[in-house]
Amino acid sequence: MIPPGFVQELLSRVDIADVVGRHVELKRSGANLMGLCPFHAEKSPSFSVSPVKQFYHCFGCGASGDAIRFLTEHLGLSFVEAVRDLAQGAGLTVPEDDASPEERERRDTLRQRRLSATAVLTRAAEFYRGQLRAHPRAIDYLKQRGLTGQVAARFGLGYAPPGWRTLAGVFPNYDDPVLEEAGLVRQREAEGDGGEGSHADGGRYDWFRDRIMFPIRGVAGEVIGFGGRVLDDSKPKYMNSPETPVFSKGRELYGLFEARQALRDKGCALVVEGYMDVVALAQAGFTNAVATLGTACTAEHVQKLFRFTDVVVFSFDGDAAGRRAAARALEAALPHASDLRTCLLYTSDAADERSRVDLGGRRIIKKKKTVRSLRAQHTYSREHYNHQLATNTTSVAQ
Ligand code: ZN
C-alpha cells in the first residue's frame, strides 16, 4: 500500500510537462503545451498539457489525467510501478507501510542489481550495434532477409562477433559478477570437462557469439536482454538471454517497446513467433507486431498487451506445433478477454520463418487483408471462444 499522502506529495514535486515531454514532443501554446496525442492517431495536435493544473487532456479522444495516469496509460506501467518511477526521478523514497526493514532492504538490493544489469546490457547493445556496421557478413545476412538499415536501426539490431571473450574489450573488468548476472557471460563448468568452455581463455566466456543480436527492451526502452540468431544453419538457431533479475521470458514480449505507439494507433496487437517476423512485419508497415521469446504465450503476456489494446491477434504457423501454440495462447488469453477485449486467432500457413520473410510483400499483404476482414466481420465474445474451444480448437486456429 502506498499512502495517499505520499502520492499527493509526489504529484506536487514532479512536473507533468517534463514527464509527458519525455515521450511526446510538446510546443508551447498560450498557458498550455500542445503535441500529437500518443493515445490516438492524429496529424494535427489536439493533446494539451497544463503545467498549472498538472493535467493532460486530449480534445480528440478525451484521454486525460495526471502524471501517474500518463505513465500507466502510455507505458503500460502498473500504478505502483508508475509511482516508483516518478519517485525515483524526483529523488523521493516510496514509503511502504507493510514492508519490514529486511523486505525493504531486499527490494533495494534487487533494484540496485536491476540497474547494474540494464546498464551493462545497454552498453553491450551499443557495442553489438557498432559491430554490425563493422561486419559486412552480418549486414549481408540482414539484406538477404530483405531488411533495410532503417528498420535495423529502429530495433537496434547488432552483431556479436565470433570471439570467446569479445566483451572483455568492452568491459575492462570482465570478471565483474554483474556481467554474469545480466546474462552476458557464462562461467565455465567444472575444471576439465572438455566442453565448449575449454576454448575459452580463463573461466568465463561470452554468452552470445557470431549471432545477429536483437535487443529486448523494457517499458522505458532500457535493454533487459537479447535474442541472438545464427547467420547460417547451425544450432541452436535462436538463443535468448537466460533468466536474470531484469529478464523473464514468461513475462516479456519482443518488440513491445517499439510497438507500443502502434498498438494504440492500429487498435490491435499482432502476436507472432519470432524476432525476425516482428522486424520484417514492422518494415512492411505492421509496427504493431510483438513476439514471445521461445515460449508459449502466457497469461502475463496477454495481460501486458491488454494494457495497450483491446484486440490481440495471434498469428502462428499452420503446422501442428503452431496450432498447439495457438491453442495454448488462446487458453492464456481467454480469462482476460471480454466483449471489449476481443481475441482473434489467425494461423498462417507458412511453415517456415524464411518463406514468410522472403515472400515479403505478398504474404504480408495477405496477412493484412485477413486481419482487416477478421476485424470487420467478427466481434467475437468470450462466450464464442469458450464455445469454439470446447467444440473444436483447430477450427478456430485455421
Ligand atoms: Zn487523443
Image: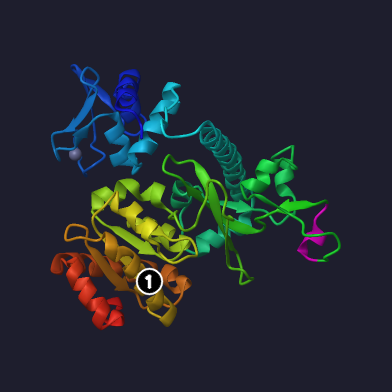
Quadrant containing ligand 1 reads top left
Instruction: Judge whether residue 200 is colored magenta.
Output: yes
Instruction: Judge whether residue 305 is colored magenta.
Output: no
Question: Residue tagged by mark 1?
Answer: 328
Q: Residue at x 51, y 60 (%)?
A: 143
Amino acid of disc 1: Arg
Choose between 2 and 217: the one closer to the eye: 2
Relative side of 304 to 93, left or right:
left
Q: Which residues are magenta?
A: 195-201
Q: Residue at x 38, y 56 (%)?
A: 300
Which quarter of the rendered picture does the C terminus lie within? bottom left
Name above or below for residue 378 compared with residue 312. Answer: below
Location of residue 204 in the rendering, given as x and y in whole percent from the top left corner:
76, 51
Name above or below for residue 112 compared with residue 343. Answer: above
Location of residue 265 in the rendering, given as x and y in whole percent from the top left corner:
24, 49
Relative side of 361 to 136, left or right:
left
Q: Is mark 1 within 8 Å of ligand 1?
A: no
Choose between 380 and 280: the one closer to the eye: 380
